[in-house]
Image (cartoon, rainbow, N blue to C red):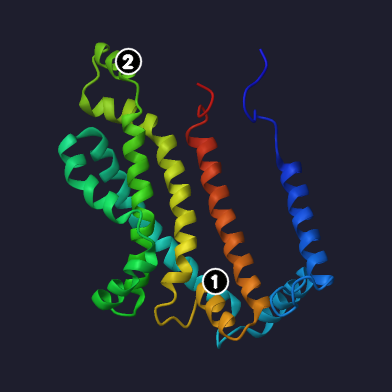
């Protein structure tokens, strides 16, 4: 039978060709002056600026210090969101009381953009690292929790009944049936949450920061240093891609059956 959908053939060549086409279009638009140079530097100028920032730093800190500050915030926030979100999401999927209690507040704040409650973080928690990390945790918690809940609720009841008929107790049902079935959704939720976290990073680092990629972008934008802004965007994109690739690798290791059943 003919396959359906994108199939399993690699799309790396298509992706590389698309990226090269975008870079070529960017270079042509900048070189021909279609967009003023102040607003759109050429790709080679952005590469040169990366070397300058790597050598001389930016705003009193080296490039590695800016990247390390942002990575620290993202990683700590992700660990907190994962530690809290997965158990609560599984509980919401298994217990209607937990779902009834937790669903309303999560659904209330989840659609809100992080900038809307950023002032509250500053008022309640000050301008230190706590407010920044809390903002990132709130941004990442909801997709992880809701994905874990969806993973449990998508579990076929036939699988549960088959395990019960073979004498499985509640703990065995959870470890051998519920958790493996929910794991693909959980990993997808973590990947989405990391993307949301990186997009929230710039907002988080608005809070009296002197280090971080988001701070570097916002500081450079105030001086119309567009090449530095592109450098910051490229670094965030590279970090986000690396995190996403790591989660995809975990998926191939932990849930090799995903998409094949």
How many marks overall?
A: 2
Residue 243 vs residue 31, the one in the foreground: 31
Foreground label between 2 and 1: 2
* Horizontal side of residue 58 vs 50, given as left or right: left
Q: Mark 1: few, some, or many residues within 10 Å (few <14, many ≥20)?
A: some
Which residue is most to the left?
Answer: 97
Residue at x 64%, y 31% (from the top left corner): 6
Q: Quadrant of the N terminus?
A: top right
Report the disc number at residue 158: 2
| Residue for point 71% across, 78% down | 49
Mark 2–mark 1 CB contact (< 8 Å): no
**Residue 3 lies in what quarter of the image?**
top right
Q: CA distance from mark 2 to mark 1?
A: 48 Å
Does label 2 or label 1 sit earlier along the sequence?
A: 1
- SS for callout 1: helix
What secondary structure is found at the residue carrying circle 2?
helix
Instruction: Give x and y (percent) for residue 129.
Output: 36, 75
Most extreme residue toward the front, as rendered? 34
**Residue 131 location in percent, x, y?**
32, 72
Q: Which residue is mark 1?
A: 67
| The disc label shown at residue 135, or none | none
- Residue at image position (34%, 79%) is 128
Q: Could you tell me which residue is drawn at 33 percent across and 57 percent down?
A: 80
């Amino acid at each position: 039978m003919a396959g359906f959908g994108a199939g399993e053939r690699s799309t790396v060549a298509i992706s590389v060709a698309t990226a090269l086409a975008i870079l070529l279009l960017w270079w042509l638009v900048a070189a021909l002056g279609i967009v003023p140079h102040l607003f759109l530097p050429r790709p080679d100028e952005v590469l040169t600026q990366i070397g300058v920032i790597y050598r001389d730093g930016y705003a009193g800190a080296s490039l590695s210090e800016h990247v390390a500050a942002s990575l620290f915030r993202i990683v700590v926030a992700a660990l907190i969101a994962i530690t809290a979100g997965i158990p609560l999401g599984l509980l919401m999927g298994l217990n209607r009381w937990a779902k009834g209690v937790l669903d309303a507040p999560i659904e209330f704040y989840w659609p809100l953009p992080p900038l809307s409650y950023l002032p509250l973080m500053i008022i309640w928690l000050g301008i230190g690292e706590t407010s920044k990390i809390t903002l990132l945790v709130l941004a990442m918690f909801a997709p992880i929790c809701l994905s874990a809940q969806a993973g449990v609720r998508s579990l076929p009841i036939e699988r549960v009944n088959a395990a019960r008929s073979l004498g499985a107790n509640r703990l065995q049902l959870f470890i051998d049936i519920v958790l493996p079935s929910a794991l693909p959704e959980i990993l997808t939720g973590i990947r989405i949450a990391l993307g949301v976290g990186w997009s929230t990073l710039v907002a988080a680092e608005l809070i009296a920061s002197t280090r971080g990629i988001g701070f570097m972008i916002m500081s450079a934008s105030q001086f119309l240093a567009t090449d530095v802004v592109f450098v910051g965007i490229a670094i965030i994109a590279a970090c986000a891609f690396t995190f996403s690739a790591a989660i995809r690798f975990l998926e191939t290791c932990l849930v090799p059956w995903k998409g094949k059943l």
